[in-house]
Image (tube, coloured by chain):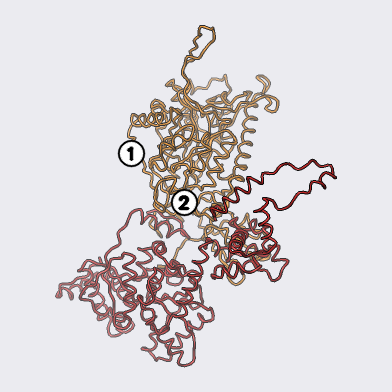
Amino acid sequence: MNGTVLQPEFLVRIDEDRCDQCKRCLEYCGFGTFSFANDKILPNHSKCVACHRCVTFCPELAITVVENPLSFRNHANWTPRHIRDVFKQSETGGMLLTGMGNDLPYRILFDHLVLDACQVTNPSIDPLREPMELRTYLGRKPDVLEIKRNEQGTDLLKTNIEKNIKIELPIVFAPMSYGSISFNTMKAICMSAAKLNTLMYTGEGGLPRDLYPYGDHIILQCASGRFGVSPEYLNVGIGTQIKIGQGAKPGIGGHLPGEKIPENISQTRMIPVGTDALSPAPQHDIYSIEDLRMLIYALKEATGYKPVCVKIAAVHNVAAIASGIVRAGADLVYLDGFRGGTGAAPNIVRDHVGIPIEVAIAVVDERLREEGIRNKASIVAAGSIRCAADVCKAIALGADACAIGTAALIALGCHVCQKCYTGNCSWGIATQKPELVGRLDPEWGAERICNLLEAWATEIKEVLGALGINAVESLRGNKERLRGIGLDRTILEVLGVKPAGIGMGDYYENRG
Amino acid sequence: MWIVDKGPNLCIIVFCVLRSQRRKLPDYAFFWGCQIPARFPFLEKSMRLALDSLEVRYHDIDGFTCCPPSIAIESLGNRIWLTTAVRNLAVAEKNGFDILTGCNGCYSTLRRASSIMASNTSLRKEMNEKLARFNLSYNGTTKAKHIIEVLFDEVTPDAINRKVKKPFSRMRLAVHYGCDLLRPSTQIRFDDPIRPTKFDSLIEATGAQSIDYETKMMCCGGMLSEMSDEKEALLAAKKKLAELRDLNVDAMCVCCPSCFIQYDARQTLLKASGDHFDIPILYYTELLCLAFGMSPEEVGVKKHAVKPTRFLEEWEAKNKALESAAKHFDVWFLEKCYECKACVEDCPSAKALDSYDPNRIIGEVLEGRLDEVLRSRDIWRCLECHTCYELCPHKIGMVQIFSKLKELAISKGLGPRGIRAAQDSFKKEGALAEIVEISRKRLGLPPSRKSGNKELLQLIKELEESKDDGPG
């Protein structure tokens, strides 16, 4: 029964000349990497996850973390990753778990799409001198507007407009469950949503009472485990969301280990302390579009007809599924691509199940337009939106707004070490250990998230100006302003995007 | 089963899976062996008590013999040793139980025998032909397990930790694995044969610290008395005991009756020849029973050759101290704060005053000397500058402890006169200083506005009456 044959992934280097043995790193590391003996800090390299908490807070800048340069014999098929995974599984007999989003080098379509800009004619607009409209309304839009004139001669709207959600920029916060993230993380996100006048989604796990005051900026999720769902909860916010699937783990449920369920989580989720919260893979009352329609209208009835959003993972048949969802009465369709993040998922599902969000947006938008129901629901796209350019491209492909999860956590200090499932997050983000949670100051976090999104908003305005348009509305589904580089003909057709070099009026044989 | 990375969380994750699957523990036949029931019935009692409180189901069955220990019997003829061991396995298999043992020697013999049987089919056939006359056969469905193995792999340290009522916190224990628990590893397969960790984790589950020491993996050497002579056995025992004495450990923890004799009984022999160690030797289940809140009399630890009197007193004192600290503080944080010291050197008062050591005061609170601390002037040397807060990895800081200490001191009528006078004035007037209107007028400043002191005084009065100072 010899120990492991697995070598550490990272090496922790401590500069002995600089280190003055203050031992702060011992406390900072949530994974117990450091110990102290004989006047020396001793790192146990195999415990290091490269989250850089110790590196960031070492007062003497004496610590650095490097990738273990240990070489395996070069093999393009049996990569070190495969070999290491076989070691892990042969030593444990378990399914490999991970956190965060898919990290395999699949082609990222966003990085093969470029945006247009105006030159000479149809001049570009200068966002510093002219107003730019980023405001977006999420929800069902009417087919036609009927006006009737009353006896006094005033024109009145005859059409009943469904409730819409007004957001000041086309970026919202993705659902992350209370439990997978800490209270302070959730509070930072709520505060940001309120300050930016946008919205955040709760995840499976309810909403702590202390955050009810932010309700005007919250969509409440109702997921398969129904954790934390009550009539009061459903009515706290501006809408509800039915979670069918998640981009990181399409087709499977959630698992929040009992270790991440202390008193506060237990109260909000309404389950005993320390019990595993297992969300079923399906919603057990939804086995058809008709069932879904019943739940959508049940939620509408329960909330006075606030908008209902349905969240699905991007899978092969996403266009038909989304069409069914809209016909079932959803006001928003939330698409989550296969690079989306998670607090815990089996490696195999995170890395190999689902389809890219770029494709999902394009095919869903196209399908809804073909069926003449695109106005009946807004599309929110998520699944690894990394920068403002991704937002612009997602909107041009057909989304109304984008949701960010991982990007917001990175703003809070997350270093994407992918260990959220352990509950040891040294940054206090994805943990429930009070001593770790206390490290994250919600005010500080909200300031950073707001800075990030204000920066993105400025960049989006800059791009809109270059495109010669002054409202995000005019970019939505405007695939003519996108071109593909290095993408093959088939994928371009799926995306409905022309290759670079083909002009607007040019005949393109494959788009008859 | 969900697990994943090697590392600190391994057992946590495996554990949550086991719990979520509600895996039932198997039933065991307890194999007491020769030594435990004959010489150490109190060890048997602690094993029974510990297993009962952890709801491990074990049965006493007829038909077992000596295991037998390979060191004594194998040289009599490998076949005799093996046949005896396989017969014991066959008896348990017939009853449909796994074997549970609390002796490293029995464990090693039975484990090695079943490993030999699993890999050598012709030998197994031959054995089973011999056993058939007695209506017995061994087909490998029964496995021998050590009590330590069952506690770690099946009960899990987490479940044990949840049952602890009187932890051994701040006690330093030296773990002694014993050879037969680990080696030969290819046949035993319990833990890493050179750098094991499982028994350590079980000790830490009781709240104690399992210290690292140089002779940790050294064989107890007790068998030297049978193989060579008593003097040499004493020399072997001395080696480890001397190191532990230098390290000032509180006790040694074993999981085998032979190791127990070597360090417990032979320690008294060493004492007779002038070597004083006074290190109590505890079998792991004894430690467990004590941690679960059973009395030392019930467990039988007073029957040891080395009386653990001082150890038990210290443990009682530490628990009492922690209880008194827990009335006002989060002990977990106090302990962390006491260990860390990351901010102490930057505390301005500590820099300016040689006699002031805030860390020592926190240590005194942990030792249960709260009354003494409250009476000392030291706690008033914390100026609440919050430098420690900024340097604290948990953003809590010593300052929080000192604020609480000051509050406790004031509530007991202690504290510096200056502060008490200021507080009295505040409670009476609602302010700490009086405004002199005439000097304002001379400077051409507007007259001061009417204060809200009346309302404030009413509020203070109500709070004083309800004694509700908010969350402590």
Which percent across, then down, holds residue A258?
A: 42, 53
Task: Give the quarter of the figure containing the C terminus of chain B.
Answer: bottom right
Chain appearing in red on the rendered image: B
Q: Residues within 10 Å of mark 2 (few under 14, many from 20)?
A: many
> Residue extending furthest bottom?
B273
Chain on which label 1 sits? A
**Residue A313: percent from left, percent from top:** 43, 37
Which chain hosts label 2? Answer: A
Label 2 sits on what residue type? Tyr
Q: Mark 1 — residue?
A: A284
Estimate the x, y position of residue A344 in percent, counting from the top left.
45, 48
Q: Is residue B330 left or right of residue A451?
A: left
Q: Is residue A473 above or below residue A312?
A: above
Which element carries disc 2, helix, strand or loop? helix
Residue lying at 45% horizontally and 68% vertically, measured from the top left:
B167
The N terminus of chain B - image quarter: bottom left
* Relative side of A119 to B80, left or right: right
Q: Amino acid at mark 1?
A: His
Q: CA distance from mark 2 to mark 1?
A: 25 Å
Dot label at residue A421: 2
Mark 1, residues whose alpha carbon is within 10 Å: few (<14), some, or many (≥20)?
few
Q: Residue A242, position in %: x, y?
A: 41, 35
Q: Depth check: B400 or A349 in front?
A: B400
Pick whichever of labels 2 and 1 is earlier in the sequence.
Answer: 1
Mark 2 or 1: in front is 1
Query: Chain A hue?
Result: orange
Q: Residue furthest right?
A: B442
Rendered view: B447 above or below A55: above
Residue B233, quarter of picture: bottom left
Given residues B326 and B104, the one toward you in this image is: B326
